[in-house]
Amino acid sequence: MSYCVNCGVELAPSERVCPLCGTEAVNPRQPFDKAAPKPFPARLDIFAPTDNRGFLALVVTIVLCLPAAVCLACDAAYTHGAGWSMLVAGAMALLWVFIVPAMYVRRHAVLILGVLDTAAVLGYLWMIEHFAARGPWLVQLALPLVLLVDFLFAADYFLMARAVSARLRRAALAVATVPLFLVGLEVCLDRYLDGRVSLSWSFIVSVPCLLFALLLVVLDRRERFKREMRKRLHM
Ligand SMILES: [Zn+2]
């Protein structure tokens, strides 16, 4: 029996070098024997990862369908379908659209997921207006806000995927998106509440955001700072 002179691991007669550290096996009493059986199997079995997505999707569907079905049944039995149960069922359907398609769609097909999720959110907002709220808030407030958030998300995603690769610049881009959202939010709220637009608080919050984004861009250009950050944050 041989042992590696460097790391002490036990060596089979068929091993010319140590499988751990690569040191040459030296034992005059047990020279290298090419014909001796190898300690490791020659073939490599590769197991395909099991795909549980179908089962998971079924579990999610059942978990979401149950409360919706119970609420619809109660609503039909006690209040003769006043509509509140439709909001619960709609919320469950919304969750389903958020969770299940994401299991099947690949990473690069984020656009498909975005369109699906937006359609689901708009459908649910329509349900709220139809069954609960009154007034033109869907068209004047909710719809523009959903489209604004969608647009900003899509713009950030494509810029980060295609053009902006450095982490600090990505953070700067994300921070710089906040003022755009805030200005859009104030425009929508002003139009809905007063009918006229006068920007005030969104500007006040936007200025520190833009300054912070600018600071991140400046720091991104400082190699020494980046090295220090990587060292301290183990990045
Ligand atoms: Zn060794």
Image (cartoon, helix red, strand yellow):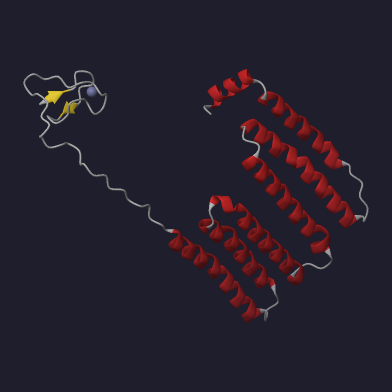
Give 207 or 23, whichever is nearer the viewer: 23
Residue in the foreground of this view, choosing between 26 and 75: 26
Left or right of residue 118, residue 65 in this image: left
- 233 versus 78 height, above or below: above
In percent of width and height, residue 108 lies at 57, 50
Query: Residue 223's quadrant in the figure?
Result: top right
Q: Which residue is more in the foreground, 69 or 118?
A: 118
Q: Residue at x 54, y 69 (%)?
A: 65
Q: Residue furthest front?
A: 34
Name the quadrant of the N terminus: top left
Residue 120, given in percent of the width and then of the height, sits at 66, 63
58 horizontally vs 16: left or right: right
Q: How many marks?
A: 0
Q: Quadrant of ligand 1?
A: top left
Residue placed furthest toward the left: 29
Residue 173 vertical position relative to residue 66 in the rendered view, above or below:
above
Q: For the point 55% across and 23% down, which residue is it?
A: 232
Q: Position of residue 187 (x, y in %)?
A: 86, 50
Judged left or right of residue 48, residue 5 is left
Locate residue 80: give its quadrant: bottom right
Residue 36, by quadrant, is top left
Percent position (x, y) of residue 42?
21, 41
Q: Residue at x 59, y 77 (%)?
A: 73
- Closer to the camera in the image, 115 or 56: 115
Q: Is residue 111 above or below residue 23?
A: below
